[in-house]
Image (tube, grey):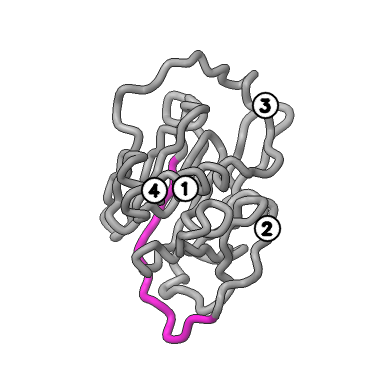
Amino acid sequence: MRTMRRTVLLLGLAVTGCAPDLRTDYPFDGQVNTGPLVEVSPQEDGSSVTLIDATNKSSLVFFDIDEGRELKADEAFDTNAWDLAFQRYTVTMNGGGGNPTGTVRVAVLKDASWDALTSAPAEGYQQDASEPVFSGVEGGWYSYDLVKHRLVPRDELLYVVQSSAGQFFKLRMLSYYDSAGTPARLSFRYQPLPAPSVLTAALPAP
């Protein structure tokens, strides 16, 4: 059963939409980072800023947003407690195409203020399908500068994640590059939200 579940999960995560080829920006040399793949920095306002090292093209970084930590692959498969997975610029969720047995859902809010969003919306939640929600809904979480060959997060998009534990978090992508300019070291900000008083069913997958 575990082998079958792992096969389905990996097949689902392999399905991604069109995205720019960033090899000219940062040619991967096969080296694997031996340091932490997830670094979470709590902020004074109750939010957290997370840095994900997704530079390895051949592996996924699993993140448990409820506990604010990385889950290694074996733990992610065994517990099914991961919420988001990162591989270069691709972000998938533990639900739908990312994993049919997962319950994570995500709502995408356009032009929503971070400070004004004080509780989770009651509707608009989706799961991944042939294309991840983070890549396909409202044009995806990034735009691509064809002149500078750089990926730029879209500040107007705010995500609300309903986690594998049923909790809610608002999330905004901050950068595809770290402070040294290294690509595929993504950062995002997230913060818990109160649940809506009434929660509607998920929308059809995109």
Mark 4 secondary-structure assignment: helix
Tell me the quadrant of the picture where the C terminus can be found: bottom right
Task: Please name whichever residue, 101 or 59, is drawn nearer the observer in this view of the structure.
Answer: 101
- The alpha-carbon separation of the residues under discs 3 and 2 comes to 23 Å
Residue ID for mark 3: 148
Tag 3 and tag 1, C-beta contact below 8 Å: no
Q: Which dot marks residue 138?
A: 2
Please identify the residue farthest to the top as the structure is shown. 29
Residue ID for mark 1: 4
Mark 3 vs 1, N-terminal side:
1
Residue located 61% across and 35% down the image: 151
Graded by Cα atoms within 10 Å as few (under 14), some (14 to 19) or many (20 or more), the crowding at tag 2 reads few
Tag 1 and tag 4, C-beta contact below 8 Å: yes
Residue 167 percent coordinates (x, y): 36, 68
Disc 2 marks a residue whose amino acid type is Glu
Q: Which of marks 1 and 2 is in front?
A: 1
